[in-house]
Amino acid sequence: MIPSNSGQTPVFCQWEIWQAWWEHEDGTRKDRPVLILSSTPSANANDAIWVAKFTKTHFPGIPSIKFVKGDPSFAQTGLSDTCYLYPSQARKIARAKFIRPRGKLSIFSAALIAVVIKQLLKFDIQ
């Protein structure tokens, strides 16, 4: 991964976790960790990338995937605390909104999440 502040164009890979600017429905924005859902070729060829955000807040009734700090593969995510991923709230964000890479999912986690995402979303993410 090339850090976004290195002066070089960053390379985005599917299943990486990045810090990015997330714009809320009320117009405010906050930098938060996001998981890249777009395929690697698509993420690097387009101006916007499909992502899902992580948050420490659990919203009952909205399908989520919990990432537990104590799990063996948690360290490679670059996340700092137990949190939830909400794939059903995925959206495209501009490449310019990506701040820096944080980490990535393990191969096993990526495979499981790919299955969950296909079940939750009614459209193909490219």
Image: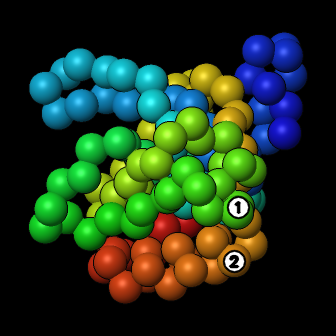
Q: Residue furthest front?
A: 70
Determine the residue positioned at 41% across, 56% down: 85
Which residue was labeled with disc 1? 73
At label 2, the amino acid type is Phe
Residue 37 visible in this rendered orientation of the protein: yes
The image quadrant where one finds the C terminus is bottom right
Residue 44 locus on image (x, y percent): 72, 47
Residue 66 locus on image (x, y percent): 42, 62
Determine the residue positioned at 33% across, 65% down: 64
Determine the residue positioned at 25% across, 52% down: 58
SS category of the residue bearing label 1: loop
Residue at mark 2 to residue at mark 1: CA–CA distance: 9 Å
Which residue was labeled with disc 2? 108
The image quadrant where one finds the N terminus is top right
Image disc number at residue 21: none
- The image quadrant that residue 15 belongs to is bottom right
Q: Which residue is more in the foreground, 97 or 76?
A: 76
Q: Which residue is more in the foreground, 93 or 104?
A: 104
